[in-house]
Image (cartoon, rainbow, N blue to C red):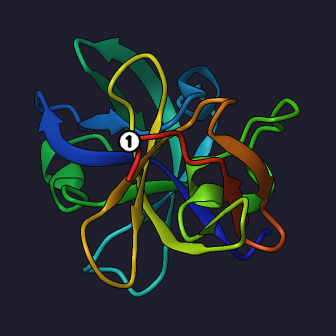
Amino acid sequence: MADSYFTVGRLVNTQGTKGEARVISETDFPEQRYKIGQTLYLFHPSAAEPIPLEIASSRQHKNFYLLTFKGVTSINEVEKYKGGILKVRGDEREPLEEGEFYFQDIIGCQVYTEEGEKLGLVEEILQPGANDVWVVKPEKGKDILIPYIEDVVKEINIAQKRIVVHLLPGLI
């Protein structure tokens, strides 16, 4: 897992003139990911390799996190990182409780009914409110929306990238 990386945020803009970056968080663990001293890896189209960035300061502001990085002290230095994706190494992911999964683990799984019928591939996860909704892309036809609730999702096997669901009336 050390060779894999997982997204924790997107560097969308600068803030002020002292090298602060505006980050949209994409993690359930912002306190851990954006703490001072944490190293994040910036993936940017202009860079051939991930750029390690150590967090020098962090604060939340509205819907953003404002971060500064060690050695980056001006708007000109952080400007070149705009549009980049901030990631952590796979071996730095937080352990989850039984029955909890990372989005990255669910996306790409094949979904089958209890009868063994292949429905398609989980392409996206929506978070509209009460529960997550998995967008399943079938080989043909419209996307299938599967609510992540106990009555529907019966089995998740991350190792085999396989999910078994019980289709309630009206789901398809």
| Viewer-closest of 79 and 129 | 129
* Residue that protrudes farthest toward the front in the picture: 169
Residue 64 in which image quadrant: top left
| Viewer-closest of 71 and 2 | 2
Is residue 155 left or right of 48 when viewed as pictured? right
Q: Secondary structure at mark 1?
A: loop
Residue 151 in which image quadrant: top right
Task: Tell me: residue 18, above or below residue 89.
Answer: above
Badge 1, how many Cα within 10 Å: few under 14, some, many 20+? few
| Viewer-closest of 106 and 20 | 106
Q: Give the labeled residue for mark 1.
A: 170
Residue at the image position 44 percent from the left and 16 percent from the top: 130
For the residue marked with disc 1, what is the amino acid? Gly
Is residue 97 left or right of 27 when viewed as pictured? right
Task: Tell me: residue 116, above or below residue 79.
Answer: below
Point out the image quarter for the N terminus. Answer: bottom right
Residue at the image position 78 percent from the left and 62 percent from the top: 158
Q: Position of residue 78 (x, y in %)?
A: 23, 50
| Viewer-closest of 101 and 149 | 149
Task: Tell me: residue 137, above or below residue 88.
Answer: below
Is residue 77 left or right of 65 when viewed as pictured? left
* Residue that protrudes farthest toward the right in the picture: 98
Residue at the image position 61 percent from the left and 30 percent from the top: 149
Q: Position of residue 140 (x, y in %)?
A: 31, 83
The total of numbered circles placed on residues is 1
Is residue 11 left or right of 129 when viewed as pictured? left
Q: Position of residue 11 (x, y in %)?
A: 28, 47
Residue at the image position 30 percent from the left and 63 percent from the top: 143
